[in-house]
Amino acid sequence: MQVIGMAGRKGCILDVSGVNKYYNRGLPSEVHVLRDVNICFDAGSFVSIMGPSGSGKTTLLDIIGCLMKPSTGTVYLNGVDTGSLDDNELARIRGRTIGFIFQQYNLVPSFTALENVELAMRVVGKPKALARKRARELLETVGLSHRLNNRPNQMSGGEQQRVAIARALANEPRIILGDEPTGNLDTRTGDRILGLLRRLNREDGYTIIVVTHDQDVSRAADRVVRLRDGSVVGGARKR
Ligand SMILES: Nc1ncnc2c1ncn2[C@@H]1O[C@H](COP(=O)(O)OP(=O)(O)OP(=O)(O)O)[C@@H](O)[C@H]1O
Ligand SMILES: [Mg+2]
């Protein structure tokens, strides 16, 4: 049996420890995108990540969400050293623990809202009837019970984003990660999405980590992590 590395600081649902990331390492085009990043994300917190374009926010979010491996350093998820997991174990733990809201929604264009949310549950083996029932409930929660059978191109940006949120919640992850979840939305729809994220955080205990340029989102957060040129320049826990 493989021994899974356990560690990370206590109370951190996600512990980013000594992380560096290079793109094109060893080539003339090498870029050092994240520099010795250390962040403990408290369970149940709402954290926003801010910084200028190119400062490494999306890279950090991809590493936090275990979609990408750091060049050096470790990400502990619930105390588990994610670097010690093989791809299958990682995919399984990630699928159960983390829900992603991508900036461009990433919905399946030929599927209806209901089918898009259902799909997330079907891929982890949930029976069809159960998946359908829960997909309906989730879409109702995000205010889309009147759009169940619409495909993405038959919905507004805000509606598609809400489908993406319903999908992110489908497998009851403890953590929601969002890359500019209000980025493409008008103010009113953005407020609505923000309200939903706050409610999920306050009432249901989700840990929420969002990359954002939106001051309203940052104001709502318990903590703002600021990145500049790949370094954390504010908001990180002291070691
Ligand atoms: N696959 C890649 N290969 C090489 N360089 C990359 C790659 N992805 C990103 N970069 C570079 O890494 C740096 C950080 O990119 P990243 O996408 O993390 O920034 P960001 O803070 O999310 O920016 P934005 O606010 O514009 O989305 C940038 O200089 C970018 O050009
Ligand atoms: Mg980005």
Image: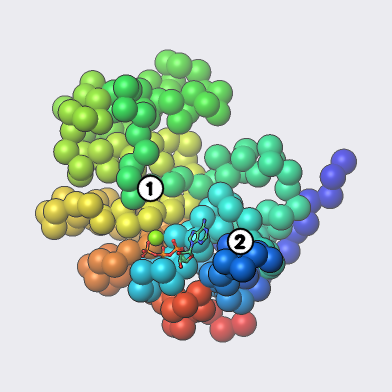
In front here: 78 or 159? 159
The residue lying furthest to the right in this view is 1
- Residue 22 left/right relative to 166: right
Q: Residue at x 51, y 47 (%)?
A: 98
The quadrant in which the N terminus is found is top right
User: Please, which colouring scheme is shown?
Assistant: rainbow
Q: Position of residue 217 (x, y in %)?
A: 27, 65
Q: Quadrant of residue 58?
A: bottom left
Q: Considering the numbered disc 1 on the image, is that residue within a helix, a strand or a loop?
A: loop
- Residue 28 left/right relative to 140: right
Q: Position of residue 75 (x, y in %)?
A: 64, 61
Marking on residue 24? 2
In this view of the protein, can residue 47 be seen by the observer?
A: no
The residue lying furthest to the front in this view is 28
Q: Is ligand 1 within 8 Å of the beta carbon of the residue shown at mark 2?
A: yes
Q: Considering the numbered disc 2 on the image, is that residue within a helix, a strand or a loop?
A: loop
Q: Position of residue 197 (x, y in %)?
A: 31, 54
The residue under label 1 is which amino acid type? Phe
- Residue 33 left/right relative to 93: left
Q: Quadrant of residue 79?
A: bottom right
In front here: 11 or 152? 152
Q: Please determine whether, in this image, residue 142 is positioned above or below residue 103.
A: above
Q: Residue at x 37, y 38 (%)?
A: 106
* Figure quadrant, ligand 2: bottom left
Q: Quadrant of residue 144?
A: top left
Q: Residue at x 29, y 37 (%)?
A: 163
Give the alpha-carbon distance from disc 2 to disc 1, as whole Å.
24 Å
Q: Residue under circle 1?
A: 102
In front here: 181 or 166? 181
Marking on residue 71? none
In this view of the protein, can residue 234 be seen by the observer?
A: yes
Q: Which numbered disc, 2 or 1, marks the residue that appears first in the sequence? A: 2
